[in-house]
Image (cartoon, rainbow, N blue to C red):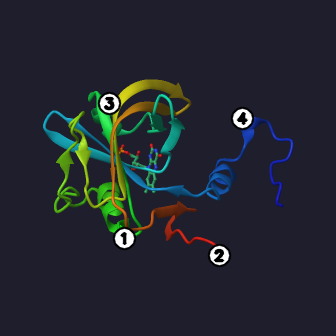
Amino acid sequence: MADENAGGDLDEIDGDLYRKVLGRYPTGVTLVAAMDGDEPLAMVIGSFVSVSMDPPLVGFLPGRESYTWGRMSSADGFCVNVLSDAQADLSNAFFRKDVDPWEGTGWQPAEVTGSPVIPSCLASIDCVTHEVVEAGDHWFVMGRVVGVSHVDEGSPLVFLGGKYGEYRAQG
Ligand SMILES: Cc1cc2nc3c(=O)[nH]c(=O)nc-3n(C[C@H](O)[C@H](O)[C@H](O)COP(=O)(O)O)c2cc1C
């Protein structure tokens, strides 16, 4: 195993190496969505995590510099929409913002929070914001789950080392 920073001070870990190493860990891809007044907003988020079963809590980490999160955080809740491997283009549309990414999504307001639910996604998790904790250059946002829905077919979109991929079960 390459040990390029052995014994290094934690504050002195090389940024490129840090990104390379963390880039070996795969994530799923979600669209975390909320309303700013009557305008739907969403961010592409890979840092989604299931936090607690009882009470049901989930979390994600938006960057503190994020313009979109700055606007979304005025809402009382958010909906996490889990993307399928057929939705890389949808992820890119929200990431690049060069077209109206909501067009054709058929989004609907979630029953409890009114946050955007995208029905073609694998799963949608509606949350009331529970706690927002400072976490370095990000926020750790936790939500209490108040509604869930899912579709039975499909596989998740995976993100690894800066590229989209597909999940393949072994055996
Ligand atoms: C696959 C993927 C996963 C991402 N995950 C996160 C994340 O977990 N947290 C985050 O702050 N930004 C993440 N981003 C970047 C955000 O979508 C967004 O572009 C960035 O926060 C800048 O936001 P802004 O344009 O609102 O300022 C991800 C982007 C991609 C393509």
Up the image or down, 136 lies above or below 164; here it is: above
Residue 118, horizontal then vertical, whole percent: 26, 54
Furthest residue in direction bottom, as rendered: 171
Q: Earlier in the sequence, mark 4 or mark 1?
A: 4
Q: Amino acid at mark 3?
A: Ser
Residue 39, horizontal then vertical, whole percent: 16, 41
Question: In the image shown, does 86 or 144 lie closer to the viewer?
Answer: 144
State if disc 1 and disc 3 touch (CB < 8 Å): no
Binning the other alpha carbons within 10 Å of mark 2 as few (below 14), some (14 to 19) or many (20 upward) gives few
Q: Secondary structure at mark 2?
A: loop
Q: Earlier in the sequence, mark 3 or mark 1?
A: 3
Q: Amino acid at mark 4?
A: Asp
Binning the other alpha carbons within 10 Å of mark 1 as few (below 14), some (14 to 19) or many (20 upward) gives some
Circle 3 residue: 73
Question: Which-is-in-front pick, marks 2 and 4?
Answer: 2
Circle 2 residue: 171
Residue, x 48% and y 45% (percent of image)? 48
How far apart are the two marked residues, 4 and 1, measured between alpha carbons?
A: 39 Å
Residue, x 82% and y 60% (percent of image)? 2
Q: Secondary structure at mark 1?
A: loop
How far apart are the two marked residues, 3 and 4, measured between alpha carbons?
A: 30 Å
Residue, x 21% and y 61% (percent of image)? 99
Circle 4 residue: 11
How far apart are the two marked residues, 2 and 4, measured between alpha carbons?
A: 42 Å
Q: Amino acid at mark 1?
A: Ala
State if disc 4 and disc 3 touch (CB < 8 Å): no
Q: Amino acid at mark 2?
A: Gly
Q: Earlier in the sequence, mark 3 or mark 4?
A: 4
Circle 1 residue: 86
